[in-house]
Image (spheres, grey):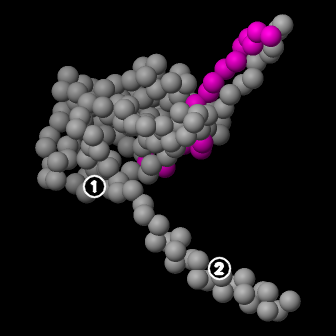
């Protein structure tokens, strides 16, 4: 019995460095707070499918919902946030801002598919764009964002799983 406990403890102790050294993706989106850049927290959307009802072999009312768990984003900012983006693809305008609907314990995308959502593409007509070292860009919206929850994401990224979930950077615009 004691031998089994000691063996399990040794196994756990030897495996801990292995998990702590797993490769983490380098952050690609940062936010400016005054003049310093801070990496933004990457979140993954979650998908919920409501079954609907089956009437004589025809499914009616099936509904897909995509959301981000948590009542609020950890990163709060002003109505004109400044981001540093180091695109993983060749195009900066693949990045978009999407406003989320706030619920009690989660934030909901307006439509289940990202391309169907009303989004603001990062382009010259919507953002002030400046070059940064190492192929990065500093982007600031030209018009103020309304208070609420938002995500910044690459619209062309591959889904994380078979449900179509994707990674994004969440933030909250607070009232001034």
Magenta residue span: 57-75
Q: Residue 87 colored magenta?
A: no
Quarter of the image holding residue 163? top right
The residue furthest front is: 57
Residue at the image position 52 percent from the left and 74 percent from the top: 18
Q: How many marks?
A: 2
- Name the residue at the top extreme: 56
Residue of label 1: 37
Indicate the secondary structure of the residue bearing disc 2: helix
Q: Where is the C terminus found, in terms of image quarters? A: top left
Seen in the image, is 99 located left or right of residue 94? right
Task: Indicate which label's residue lies in the foreground, 2 or 1.
Answer: 2
| Image coordinates for residue 152, horizontal then vertical, percent | 38, 37
**Residues at circles 2 and 1 in contact by the CB criterion of under 8 Å:** no
Q: Quadrant of residue 46?
A: top right
Magenta region includes residue 66 = yes
Q: Is 108 left, or right, of 134 in this rendering? A: right
Return the disc, 2 or 1, that comes first in the chain's sequence.
2
Helix, strand or loop at mark 1: strand
Q: Which residue is mark 2?
A: 12
Instruction: Give the percent coordinates (x, y) of residue 144.
Output: 31, 29
Query: Which label belongs to residue 126?
Result: none
Mark pair 2, 1: CA separation: 37 Å
| Residue toward you, 80 or 29 | 29
In the picture, which quadrant includes the N terminus? bottom right
Q: Is residue 176 visible?
A: no
Identify the residue shown where x is 79% and y is 92%.
3
């Amino acid at each position: 019995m004691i031998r089994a406990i000691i063996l399990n403890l040794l196994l756990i102790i030897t495996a801990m460095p292995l998990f702590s050294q797993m490769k983490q993706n380098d952050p690609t989106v940062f936010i400016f707070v005054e003049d310093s850049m801070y990496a933004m927290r990457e979140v993954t959307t979650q998908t919920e499918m409501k079954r609907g009802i089956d009437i004589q072999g025809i499914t009616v009312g099936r509904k897909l919902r995509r959301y981000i768990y948590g009542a609020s984003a950890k990163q709060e900012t002003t109505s004109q946030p400044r981001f540093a983006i180091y695109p993983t693809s060749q195009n900066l305008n693949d990045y978009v801002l999407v406003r989320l609907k706030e619920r009690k314990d989660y934030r909901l995308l307006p439509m289940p598919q990202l391309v169907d959502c009303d989004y603001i593409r990062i382009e010259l007509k919507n953002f002030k764009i400046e070059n940064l070292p190492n192929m990065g860009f500093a982007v600031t919206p030209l018009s103020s964002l309304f208070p609420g929850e938002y995500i910044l994401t690459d619209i062309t990224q591959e889904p994380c799983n078979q449900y179509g979930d994707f990674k994004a950077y969440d933030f909250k615009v607070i009232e001034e």
